[in-house]
Image: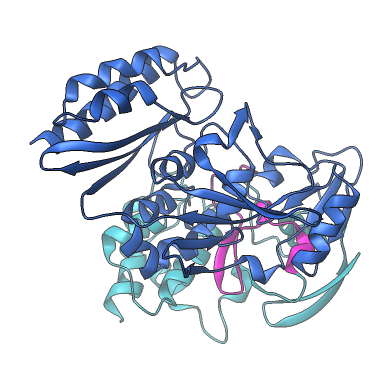
Chain colours: A cyan, B blue
Amino acid sequence: MKIEFTVNGASVSVDVDSSTRLLDLLRVDLALTGTKNGCSEGECGACSVLLDGRSVCSCLVPAFQVAGSEIVTVEGLAGEVLHPIQDAFLKHGAAQCGICTPGLLITAAELSAQEVPPKETEIRELMAGNLCRCTGYQKIIDAVVEVVCVSS
Amino acid sequence: MRLWRWSVLAVEPQLQSAKSLDEALKLLSENTDLQPLAGGTDLMVQGFGLNVLDIHKLDELRGIDVTEAGELKIGSLTTFREIVDSELVEAWSPCLVEVGRSIGARTIQNRATIGGNIGNASPAGDSLPLLMALDARLVVSSSIRGEREVPFEYLFAEYRTLNVMPDELIVAVVIPELTVFDHTHYRKVGARTAQAISKVSFSGRVRIEDEVVTEARIAFGAVGPVPIRCVAVEAALVGNPVDPQVSRLLLDEITPIDDIRSTAAYRKRASVNVLRSWLEYLAK
């Protein structure tokens, strides 16, 4: 079936099957390979994207359900300049192998847009769905805290 | 460019999308094999059936309100994120907010619905013991017979099967108001807090008036084929001051198994311990 939605600000119209995952629609059909495929069952967070402003595991979203929605992937975070969370990741060295990074940036971007900014302990809980196998969590949390807590 | 594409299915499911509750109920009455799909956080992992009814657009099933009868009503498509963020739920049952926070992580809570958690009918479904302990009722609707309510106490028929007819759709959950004498508790035992399926989940509610228990609800998940109320423990609690020793009676009521997440022996011990530690807290 044909669906229309917005990805990183651009309207797209694509054909999807009823069992197509949003993750495959993004990576295969739209060549947005920044979003990573990790566990395929919603446990690792590598495939996180923003769906109407909220972070979701794109491996668990049936593609047809995003018709009419707005999707932001890691490719869409930066405008003319990097998103503040991307700057903070660079500054704190918050990436090692990098496969969890797109998902972490997306989840952190959702937190940075929250009206009431979460505290550090809450950030740790809210980002618990994004696993880093290199276990570089402290630098990641430092980067997110700097953007979410300090700048607000 | 063609990259690897995931699929657990040999055959593409037939998909129907309902635009209204009436339409969804009509479709369900015409084809009882239809599998309702909401946020997809369970079904996208388990795989679909051959006939899927997409209900995620039914906004009439979304939202949290207090009814005229003074009960909390949560629409079945309400996400756990909405439950966690709701001041109304926080005031009504802080334990329900805790349950919401313990389900997956934020990325799951943004999609997973309370109706889906119930309809999936997993013995480890995180919200189920609490809804039992709170004497909640499930509201289901059929195009032929209209709405009816099923108390959670009687909801679970057998492993992953609800006492809900194939033409019925889960539309809401109703939760009565707690009294000032009620104490509630929720405790999940898992490998880690986020993203782990429970080894044991426990919810309790006791009403204590003049230091005597006048009503008790002790409910466990992941320790049997369905979430259960432990009626022997409840009966032993009622009429007496809180006695942590009754937690041992639990061993006659739960029937946990060995599986990839835990062992029967660990689950038995952990169940007794989480119950006893709460009762000890209440007895102080």
In this orientation, which residue lies closer to the viewer: A52 or B141?
A: B141
Question: Start and end of the magenta stretch?
Answer: A39-66
Residue B276 painted magenta:
no
Tell me where residue B141 appears, x and y as whole percent.
Answer: 70, 55
Left or right of B242? Residue B79 is: right
Quadrant placement of the C terminus of chain A: bottom left
The number of discs equals: 0
Say whether residue A19 is visible: no
Left or right of B7? Residue B92 is: left
Say whether residue B272 is visible: yes
Tell me where residue B105 appears, x and y as whole percent.
Answer: 47, 52
In this orientation, which residue lies closer to the viewer: B93 or A78?
A: B93
* B104 vs A27: above or below: above
Tell me where residue A90 appears, x and y as whole percent.
Answer: 42, 67
In this orientation, which residue lies closer to the viewer: B144 or A150?
A: B144
Instruction: Give the quarter of the image for residue B86.
Output: bottom left
Residue found at x 27% / y 58%: A121
Residue A64 painted magenta:
yes
Residue found at x 22% / y 26%: B276
Residue found at x 51% / y 41%: B152
Left or right of B53? Residue B190 is: left
Instruction: Give the quarter of the image for residue A108.
Output: bottom left
* B166 vs B82: above or below: above
Residue found at x 56% / y 74%: A53
Tell me where residue A113 appears, x and y as whole percent.
Answer: 44, 77
Left or right of A132? Residue B182 is: left
In this orientation, which residue lies closer to the viewer: A26 or B18?
A: B18
Quadrant placement of the N terminus of chain A: bottom right
Question: Which residue is most to the bottom?
Answer: A80
* B94 vs B48: above or below: below
